[in-house]
Amino acid sequence: MNNIKVFFTLLSIMLLLSCSTKQTFDDALIIKGGTIIDVSNNGTSFNDLTDKAIIIKADTIFKIVDAASISDAQDNVIDALGKYIMPGLTDGFAIINNQNYANAFLYMGITDVIGVESFCRGKFYHDANPSPNVHMLESVGGEPVTNQQILDTIQKHHNNNVEILLMMYKLTPSQLELAHNEAKKLGMGTIGELGFTSYKKGMDLGVDAFVHTTRYSLDIAPDSMALKVAEQPFSNDLGSPKWRYYQYLTNLKAENEALLQHAKNLGNSNSYIMPTFGLLYIDMPFSKNPWNEKVASIIDIKDINRPADKITGKHNYPPEELAAYQKLGFNELMIEKIYYKNGAHYISGSGTDVWGTMPGISLHQELEVLSHIGLTNREVLAASTSNFNDAFGLKFGKIETGFKANILILDKNPLDDIKNLKGGKTVILNGKPIDLEALLKK
């Protein structure tokens, strides 16, 4: 009898101690339960977390604790039991032209955008509310410049809170080194879209990332061809240097020695690549009509550069131009498969809104094509989340203490099917849930 009394006494003490360790967090949003998907190490780590609670204070992840330690009296709790939790998506190369663009990004789960503007994309709209977090990108070296002009331009960008420096065609090797080092000294990320300097040189310097398959494949071309592209990089004329180079890529074979060497260089480097497949997605044989997406209802076709036809979902380009883009896109897939097999690391960017790319929608097209070239679903998720922190040091894209609280709570597991990213979900932007249906109201 005494033993039984002792047992129940100890049990009561343990229960009391257990209750006393329950935590309550003031002024916090808590996501409790669910599976936190591990997207670290370029999507090669598998340490998913279950039975945890994510504590969010203001716009930041405060800490992650055991779900059982949260008091039943805790206010402001999102029950994620049976759901899947991951960082919000990032579009690494896109523009927001108006409020509906911002709404479309958020509706599709995109909480961060590396913002670009250009003569064909228009001016970036900075007054959207709500809006994904915007990390502006500006360029240097689009035209020949002096060393002092490079330094002055980078300082001006830094003063204007630009976070990413795009280093372009006209920079010589010594100028690329100067620009990259100055940007890193100021805490800016770097992307190369090179011409007068080889991509191998950019890799050796430690440039964070390169953009566009057709651009960062320039090392494969003969030097004389690459030089002409650098001198005249933009033209839709099928006889232009750019298009002669595109035709060279279109006819490239998988066993090409320059291609294989470039693939090895990319795989051995610490630089990330951003294919922007969205620019050619519409002309690929497996493409789906972007206008059939629910969020397309708030997008005005007049705002899109060279949009897809609403009925066919394809471009209405002149036949010769359309055939050229279709063949180029097909060979781009082959090229990127070789880069991936050789160990290249990826980040995602849609290129919105040129060549028919659309806000929010085209990033998911980009992720679809990354799957086509061989990335696992976990690697695809990493390409649009944690890899941005790994590439640029930006403090988002991970569910870790101190990171921005941009989070997706998904009804279905995206590791089973990447299309589940577009399904039922809750979007947490800067620590606050977003009303997704309200985003669909023009």
Image (tube, rainbow, N blue to C red):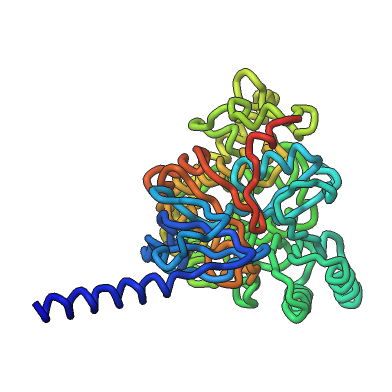
Task: Residue 219: give x, y in percent of width and height.
Answer: 61, 61
On the image, which quarter does residue 30 sit in?
Answer: bottom right
Task: Residue 192: give x, y in percent of width and height.
Answer: 69, 64
Q: Foreground residue, 437 or 66?
A: 66
Indicate the quadrant containing the C terminus: top left, top right, bottom left or bottom right: top right
On the image, which quarter does residue 378 sit in?
Answer: bottom left
* Residue 138 position (above or below residue 304): below
Q: Which residue is at the far left?
A: 1
* Residue 91 position (above or below residue 311): below
On screen, residue 287 versus residue 48, left or right, reads right
Which residue appears at 57% of the width and 58% of the height? 347
Task: Residue 39: give x, y in percent of width and height.
Answer: 46, 61
* Residue 383 position (above or below residue 280): below
Q: Foreground residue, 5 or 255?
A: 5
Which residue appears at 45% of the width and 43% of the height? 411
Q: Can residue 91 be seen in this view?
A: no
Which residue appears at 75% of the width and 37% of the height? 100
Task: Residue 283: give x, y in percent of width and height.
Answer: 58, 32
